[in-house]
Image (spheres, coloured by chain):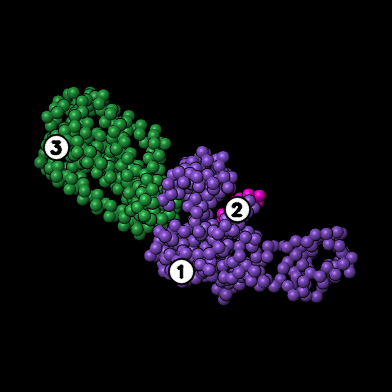
Chain colours: A purple, B green
Amino acid sequence: MTTALSIENLRKTYGNEFEALKGISLEVKEGDFFALLGPNGAGKSTTLGIVSSLVNKTSGKVSVFGYDLDTHLAQAKQCLGVVPQEFNFNPFEKVLDIVVTQAGYYGIGRKQATERAEHYLRKLGLWSKRDERARMLSGGMKRRLMIARALVHEPRLLILDEPTAGVDIELRRSMWDFLTEINAAGTTIILTTHYLEEAESLCRNIAIIDHGSIIQNTSMKALLQKLDTETFVLDLAEDFDELPVLDGYVIRPRDAHTLEVDVPKEKGLNTLFQHLASKGMEVTSMRNKANRLEELFVSLVDKNLNQETA
Amino acid sequence: MNTGLLWTAFVTIVVKEIRRFTRIWVQTLLPPAITMTLYFIIFGNLIGSRIGDMGGFDYMEYIVPGLIMMSVITNSYGNVVSSFFGTKFQRNIEELLVSPVPNWVILAGYVIGGAARGLGVGFIVTLLSLFFTDLQIHHLFITITVVLLTAILFSLGGFINAVYAKTFDDIAIVPTFILTPLTYLGGVFYSIQLLPDFWQGVSQLNPILYMVNSFRYGILGVSDINIGFAFVMILGFIALLSGFAMHLLNTGKGIRE
């Protein structure tokens, strides 16, 4: 399978001597939906900035679909679409003009650019806003405008740096559907997000970056299997008098009729339910306390922090 | 990118630049028209009628080429410095930086966009001058070439200023403290032959003197300086500033982290 993005021993030290990337290596295969996660300041945006030519690297090698950024920059850029974290369009320009102008930078003539702009603006629900100045759009619309702009030259690799930040849940889900659709059509996607539920439901492979180093790089499935314990919240039909105790499980009260239970993976839920039933406790509903990936993410980043400070 | 794609990218930047300054024409095209009309009325008509001849022409005829050139210089420079700095400030420079447009096409697009505004304003001022004097062009080729090269040269200057600028103050410093004094002392309103020898020598260090006089030569056929030398100097400055601007773009000065 073709490699969409290859990063080898990438380093970046800023002018103030801050070492943002400490020699990271990464590979993303064509057709993948890849999550690049990490806490704030971990080096995600620096990595994506170097890939999209907005940040100069200190050393290392980056290739997009086999095109080395040092030797075949134009070809690499032709394969790449970028949706940045911050709004970076001219707010005084019209929505349609922003997308058509971007197509022009890729050498696409005005007629074809306008057709493509219409296609993507319709897909993203912005066609009715095409003649409005960009500054008049809502936050969610501005994010979708940046996605339309990034897609207008039909890139093979789309980089999305927190595309759903500040977007309401309904719109976020419609954006997920759209991204899933273009990924299914063949576009490789790299996503950074702070919504770990988003990464878990969309991405097949994942890398976690922290303090400028990759601390995990595996498939989403393999990563989630590393989760030893999941915490569930159980709502009971009635208030309990006495907190149940079960060997191997940690059970905490949340309020008079809600329990929080740490369930080890090897123990499972059946024993817990049987125990509660034997105590006359009826469970009316159950949910994960936190998203599974979120639990893993926090534990991995904490572990990395402890190792660094040790 | 092949030639066709490069041309499309270049035209896209130029059209974007032209649309920008025509969209805000009240800020870009109207003020120089009003200012120059006042110059024509006050300096040309009211005061000029008492000054008499200058270089063998009545004063109004003498200052018209200088005032046209002054408009071209300030507007070419002003367009690129404000547009490119605005693009940096709003971060939409990233639209260009992530695209495969080569740096020389980015530079050419902004420079031609700036020259378009300079020449557009120059054309408006020329039309306005016709209300005050008869304009007969002595050397059409020299007139057009000088005004075009000057517009390109000052667009390049504006571009370099914008690359270095970090605040809006930084884009006003050069036009206010360097460009305006040099333009006023560059023979727009007088022939340097009126000055004592020492100040004539000092004036010849002012590059704007050569552009104003070459343009005046194209229109009126009179000049304080050697036209051939003026052309060499303008072309030399264009080569120097182009090379420097390309160096800034290639190293990412002010635009890449």
Q: CA distance from mark 2 to mark 3?
A: 67 Å
**Of callouts 1 and 2, which one flags the residue occurring earlier in the amino acid sequence?**
1
- Which structural element holds mark 2? helix
Answer whether residue B44 is visible to the viewer in this image.
Answer: yes
Residue B231: x %, y % from top left:
18, 45
Give the magenta part as a residue range. A162-172
Labels in figure, total: 3
Residue A14: x %, y % from top left:
43, 64
Q: CA distance from mark 1 to mark 2?
A: 31 Å
Give the residue at x 10% y 41%: B197
In the rendered structure, the answer to whether residue A137 lies left or right of residue B183 reads right
In the rendered structure, the answer to whether residue B105 lies left or right of residue A277 reads left
Residues marked 2 and 3, same chain: no
In the rendered structure, the answer to whether residue A101 lies left or right of residue B184 reads right
- Which structural element holds mark 3? loop
In which image quadrant can residue B64 be found?
top left
Amino acid under disc 2: Phe
**Residue topped by disc 1:** A10
Q: Neighbour class for label 3 at 10 Å: few (<14), some, many (≥20)?
A: many
**Residue topped by disc 2:** A178
Write down the chain letter for disc 3: B
Give the residue at x 24% y 49%: B238
**Residue topped by disc 3:** B223
Q: Neighbour class for label 2 at 10 Å: few (<14), some, many (≥20)?
A: some
